[in-house]
Each structure stands twice: as structure tokens, then as C-alpha cells.
């Protein structure tokens, strides 16, 4: 999957390897060597719609103060893919591959900045005021980790001197690790800062909303969801793709394809898991009963602590609870075309469009991305510069290199140094092709 267009630039290289499967399983038929071995690779990305690179450097405020400024809903994605050992081979018209991966994802989805600031600040505000809050969507705080063992098969369907068509599919066995979700659906209410002793305290009142609180058992008393990247086998996913090449004497004039990826779901299955739907009903505040004191959450260290804090108030009513948590993978449709402009110079166009709805409580998030990447490619050396428009962070521009089997790069390093980009990412890996 490419939740944030991971490995941008290198995965569309004409030096096809195991990494190309992440774009389209049909690309495996284009392996440049009979065998391909992946030793390691990783990609990590953080993007948001609030904090620019210059903000972090020039501001004396902490990240919470920066991200909850203004009135625009907060969207933040922290995303990582880690490839373990992998192997691929070609045999006649067939190609086969085995991959291992781990995923780490953390998200804020359409979070009201005034509500987020009040929860973070608690009773540190110096201003007495009131604010009306209203949203027409499901605000979410979500985190997921899981592992994957993938098996890919691709076949050359037709080939002559000028044209080549390939098809491919991947079946992926999923190993759920950790999961946490807080969803606040169609929230509206009133936020009051009132005196509590000598300092103003944030109170929430006039609320009637639906609340989902879910977590896997390993997060019941912990906030570190990265401790478990691989759980037990409990899920399956499929990828499908087709590929076309307009050939020339060296390689191709055009390489294009479409794919649908991550059709499937994870199941977190444990008697100590918890996924509960609540009704949160807080009456309009009065002088004697101002509402829910948000400073109660300042010492919360886990999602279960937050749930227990709410259960200790008279405002929460349980509707439905279960221990099996089913989570949809971030299904996406992707399409790309790689053009040879002149000898050794290529330009790739890529787009990824999500199929799921990020506001659903059981949906792992993804982003819509469109990118263009000019690339200068030799047999043992490659340099490229991906430029993209991302749904969350806007425009990004980066730079990357491949030297033999070693590759590294960033899809945002140029805009980070020259403008106020809202994304930071880096990837690196090593693979070996064998005749």
C-alpha cells in the first residue's frame, strides 16, 4: 500500500525490483534480473495541514499550541512502512515474489482545534470566555500497527516487438499488532473557561453526541502502540493490477498501469479488546453545574484512562460493546505512466485515490496524492525529483538517489528548505538483483 505515496520517485524506477510491487503487482513481470532480493527498506512520513517547516524553526511555541491554532479542523498523519527480507524471481512468462512488511500509522482526522486546545490546556488558560463548537463529521484520533506477509504472482499476457501486457495479483496475510480509536460523531457543544479557584478552567456543556472508544488489549494500560508491530495471523488482503509497455530497443517508450490495492480488513481478536459505542450527553452548563471539567484529562496516560475518566462522570451511557475489532485497510486506486523523454531521461506521472471514508471509525486512513517525477537513469546510478500535491499537506518537492542497489531520498526535502512545507519524510533501502 502507499498510504502517503511512500518511496516516491524510486518505486517508479525502470530498474524494477520488489519495491515496484507496492505500485502494481503486475510490475513483477518487468523484473530486470532473474532474481531480486530485498535486504531492508523503510519510509517514514509526517504531514499535516497546520504546521509549516518554518513554524517549527521560528516559533517558541510547542507543537500542541501550533497545531491547534486557528479554526480549521486539524488533520495530521504519521505514517511508516518497514520492509523486511523479500525475494522475487522470473521464470519464462511468470514472476513470483514474497515480501514482508510492518506498518505504523497515527492520525488526527478533522479534529476541532478549540476542543483539542481545551483538552491539552485544561486549566492553563488566562482568559475567561465562551466558544460554540460544531462539526458535521466524525472527528477521530486513531492509531494502528500491523505486519504483512505477501505473495505475488505476475504473468506476461501478450508480447511482440512493440507491445507488452502484464497482469498480476498479490495475496497478503495480515498480522494485527495494536489499535486505538476515539471517534466523536457530529459534535456540537459549548466550551466555557470559568474560574475554578484562582485560574480559569475549561468546561464542556450542551453536548449530545455519539462516541466510539476502541483499543486492543495491549493498549489497555499503555500509550505506546508501536511495541507490537506483528501480532497473530488474523486478516487477508488482495491487490490486483495490469501493466502495459510500449517498447523500444533499450527498454520502453512508455510504461503504464493501474491497480486496486488493499482490499481487505484486519481483525483484532482478543477477549481483552474493547470497542464500545457511547452516548455522551452533557446538559447546558449552569453556575452550580458548569459541565465536564476538561482538566480531568491532563494526567491521562492511556486510552483506557480516558475512558475511565469519562465513565467516572454522569454524562456517558454505554450503547454497544464488543471484543472483536474489525478494521478496514486503506483501499486505494492508483494509476501511473512513465515516459521516456530522451535516452536516459524519464518522467513519471502517478495518482492515488482512496476508496474508503477516513471519517468512519473502523477505517485506516489514506491520502489522495498526485505526483510528477523527472528521473535520470543509468544502469547503476539514478537521480530523481518527485513533486506532488497531497490531500493533507499540499505541494511538496523532493530529491532522491540510487547507487547500485542502495537508494535513499525524500519527497519533501526541497520544499522544506525553500518554502513553508507541511510535510517531512525520508526513505532508504537496499536491494540486490541477480542474473
Image (cartoon, grey):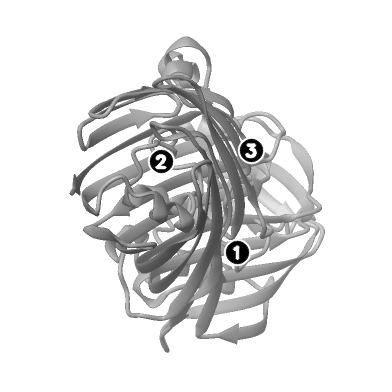
Q: What element carries label 2?
A: loop
Relative horizontal placement of residue 392, taking residue 174 as reference (left or right): right
The answer to which of 328 and 131 lies nearer the viewer is: 328
How packed mark 2 is, by other alpha carbons closer than 10 Å (few <14, some 14-19, many 20 or more), is some
Q: Mark 1 points at which residue?
A: 363
The image shows residue 176, relative to residue 380, as above or below, that is below
| Residue 364 placement (x, y as % from top left) | 55, 60
- Relative placement, left or right, of 13 versus 76 is left
| Viewer-side residue, 193 vs 36 | 36
Asked if residue 335 is positioned above or below residue 180 in the image, the reply reads above
- The structure residue drawn at horizontal position 43% and vertical position 47%, both measured from the top left corner, is 79
- Residue drawn where x is 74% and y is 35% of the image: 129
First in sequence: mark 2 vs mark 3: 2
Image quarter of residue 200: top right
Mark found first going from the N terminus, 2 or 1: 2
Q: Which of marks 1 and 3 is nearer the N terminus?
A: 1
**Percent position of residue 2, x then y:** 49, 49
In the rendered image, residue 107, in percent from the top left (x then y), is placed at 52, 50
Tell me if mark 1 has few (under 14), some (14-19) or many (20+) residues whose alpha carbon lies within 10 angstroms of its own: some
Q: Is residue 176 visible in this depiction of the protein?
A: yes
Badge 1 vs badge 3, beta-carbon distance below 8 Å: no
Viewer-side residue, 317 vs 236: 236
Measured in 3D between alpha carbons, the distance from the residue under mark 1 to the one under mark 3, in whole angstroms, is: 17 Å
Q: Looking at the image, which residue sits at the far bottom?
A: 271
Looking at the rendered structure, the number of numbered marks drawn on it comes to: 3
Q: What element carries label 1?
A: loop
Q: Which mark is residue 391?
A: 3
Q: Do the residues labelled 2 and 1 touch (CB within 8 Å)?
A: no
Q: Which disc is residue 11 wearing?
A: 2
Q: Disc 2 versus disc 1: distance between alpha carbons? A: 26 Å
Position of 106 relative to 171 (above/below)? above
Amino acid at each position: 500500500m502507499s498510504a502517503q505515496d511512500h518511496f516516491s520517485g524510486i518505486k517508479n524506477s525502470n530498474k524494477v525490483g520488489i519495491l515496484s510491487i507496492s505500485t502494481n503487482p503486475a510490475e513483477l513481470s518487468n523484473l530486470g534480473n532473474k532474481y531480486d532480493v530485498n535486504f531492508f527498506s523503510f519510509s517514514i512520513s509526517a504531514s499535516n495541514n497546520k504546521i509549516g517547516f518554518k513554524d517549527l524553526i521560528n516559533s517558541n511555541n510547542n507543537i500542541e499550541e501550533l497545531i491547534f491554532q486557528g479554526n480549521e479542523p486539524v488533520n495530521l498523519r504519521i505514517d511508516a512502512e518497514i520492509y523486511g527480507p523479500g525475494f522475487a524471481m522470473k521464470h519464462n512468462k511468470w514472476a513470483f515474489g514474497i515480501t514482508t512488511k510492518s506498518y505504523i500509522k497515527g492520525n488526527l482526522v478533522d479534529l476541532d482545534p478549540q476542543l483539542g486546545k481545551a483538552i491539552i490546556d485544561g486549566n492553563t488558560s488566562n482568559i475567561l470566555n465562551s466558544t460554540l463548537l460544531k462539526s458535521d463529521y466524525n472527528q477521530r484520533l486513531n492509531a494502528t500497527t500491523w505486519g504483512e506477509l505477501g505473495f505475488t504472482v505476475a504473468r506476461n499476457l501478450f508480447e511482440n516487438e512493440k507491445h507488452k501486457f502484464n497482469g498480476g495479483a498479490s495475496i497478503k496475510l495480515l498480522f494485527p499488532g495494536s489499535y486505538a480509536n476515539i471517534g466523536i460523531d457530529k459534535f456540537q457543544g459549548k466550551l466555557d473557561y470559568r474560574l475554578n479557584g484562582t485560574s480559569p478552567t475549561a468546561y464542556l456543556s450542551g453536548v449530545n453526541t455519539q462516541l466510539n472508544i476502541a483499543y486492543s488489549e495491549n493498549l489497555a494500560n499503555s500509550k505506546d502502540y508501536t511495541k507490537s508491530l506483528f501480532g497473530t495471523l488474523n486478516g487477508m488482503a488482495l491487490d490486483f493490477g495490469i501493466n502495459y509497455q510500449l517498447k523500444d530497443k533499450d527498454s520502453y517508450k512508455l510504461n503504464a498501469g493501474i491497480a486496486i490495492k488493499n482490499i481487505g480488513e484486519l481483525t483484532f481478536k482478543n477477549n481483552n479488546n474493547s470497542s464500545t459505542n457511547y452516548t455522551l450527553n452533557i446538559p447546558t452548563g449552569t453556575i452550580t453545574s458548569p459541565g465536564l471539567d476538561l482538566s480531568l484529562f491532563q494526567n491521562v496516560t492511556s486510552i483506557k484512562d480516558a475512558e475511565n475518566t469519562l465513565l467516572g462522570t454522569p454524562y456517558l451511557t454505554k450503547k454497544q460493546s464488543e471484543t472483536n475489532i474489525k478494521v478496514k485497510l486503506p483501499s486505494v486506486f492508483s494509476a501511473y505512466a512513465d515516459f521516456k523523454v530522451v535516452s536516459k531521461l524519464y518522467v513519471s506521472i502517478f495518482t492515488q485515490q482512496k476508496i474508503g471514508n477516513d471519517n468512519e471509525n473502523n477505517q485506516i486512513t489514506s491520502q489522495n496524492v498526485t505526483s510528477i517525477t523527472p528521473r535520470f537513469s543509468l544502469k547503476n546510478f539514478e537521480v530523481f525529483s518527485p513533486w506532488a500535491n497531497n490531500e493533507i499537506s499540499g505541494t511538496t518537492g523532493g530529491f532522491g538517489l540510487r547507487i547500485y542497489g542502495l537508494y535513499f531520498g525524500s519527497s519533501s526535502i526541497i520544499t522544506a528548505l525553500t518554502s513553508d512545507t507541511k510535510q517531512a519524510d525520508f526513505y532508504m533501502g537496499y536491494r540486490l538483483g541477480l542474473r
